[in-house]
Amino acid sequence: MNNTLVKGLQLLELLSARDGAAGISELADALQLGRSNVHRLLQALVELGYVTQEGERGSYRASLKIWELGARALRRLDFREAAAPAMRQLLAQSNETVHLSVLSGDEVIYIDKLDSPEPVRAYSVIGGRAPAYCVATGKVLLAWREAPASSLLAVRPLHAHTPSTAPDTAALALELERVRRQGFAINRGEWRASVWGIASPLRSANGRAIAALGISGPAERIRKKGVRQLARLVVDAAALASATLARHGDVDH
């Protein structure tokens, strides 16, 4: 693997995750690289238009070119359009925030969302990430990925984000088998203790889970409305989105 390319991408990811600009020393410390090395990488990224410099010897920040690349990639995800009516239906029925997610390694990325009209609601952003094993949409996608759940049976600790997080991969594998049997996943405060979620897969014509559709909201409100009742709404919405995708030609990603 090209080491310079890897370092450049790590630098770009670091800048993209920041709210403000950063100086060379700060970036070098974060990446554990030499200042001269970071300076050369920054200059290359500036020339390519991915980074802008504030002042002649000032700080650096990621440019909008990254957003433009992401926007183009999102436009190619045709199932976002197919899922839109189902997402609106699910929002109207549940009154909770609706998410559409895809799997990226061991994380999920939120590629679309509709916010709950409630004053207290689950916080998320389009483009945001979460550990797949901790959230409902992630567990759905792990359960239906090509590698079987049994491949996770080697016991190793998982990072405990809350007391409810799965303790190890063996426990997670059992949970994923249950998800496959029932057709939906539940997050009982495993990523954020006060937030619960429910999700079901959006399937391509060949049955592959290409995305996950789900809701999330304050734990107390989800429990009060009833997990099983909400799960039926989520499963129905995911089935509607899958059927709509099939009618649109089912672009399999």
Image (cartoon, rainbow, N blue to C red):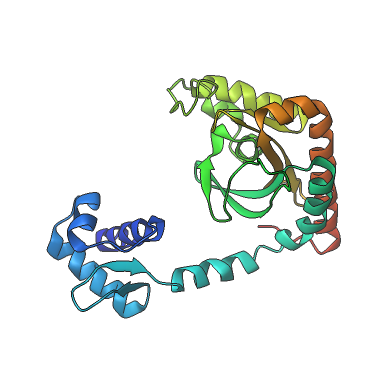
Q: Position of residue 180 (x, y in %)?
A: 72, 30
60 to the left or right of 230: left
203 to the left or right of 54: right
Quadrant occupied by the N terminus = bottom left
Q: Which residue is rendered at x = 59% and y = 29% of the image?
A: 194
Q: Position of residue 21 (x, y in %)?
A: 31, 64
151 to the left or right of 52: right
Q: Height in image: 125 above or below 184?
A: below
Q: Which residue is rendered at x = 60% and y = 39% of the image?
A: 138
Q: Position of residue 3 (x, y in %)?
A: 25, 58
To which quarter of the image does residue 196 belong? top right
- Front in this rendered view, residue 217 or 1: 217
Q: Position of residue 192 (x, y in %)?
A: 54, 32
Q: Height in image: 41 above or below 110?
A: below
Q: Height in image: 58 above or below 125?
A: below
Q: Height in image: 61 above or below 152?
A: below
What is the count of numbered marks? 0
Q: Which residue is rendered at x = 59% and y = 35% of the image?
A: 135
Quadrant occupied by the C terminus = bottom right
Looking at the image, which residue sits at the far front?
A: 119
Q: Which residue is rendered at x = 49% and y = 20% of the image?
A: 167
To which quarter of the image does residue 157 belong? top left
- Front in this rendered view, residue 145 or 130: 130
- Front in this rendered view, residue 208 or 22: 22
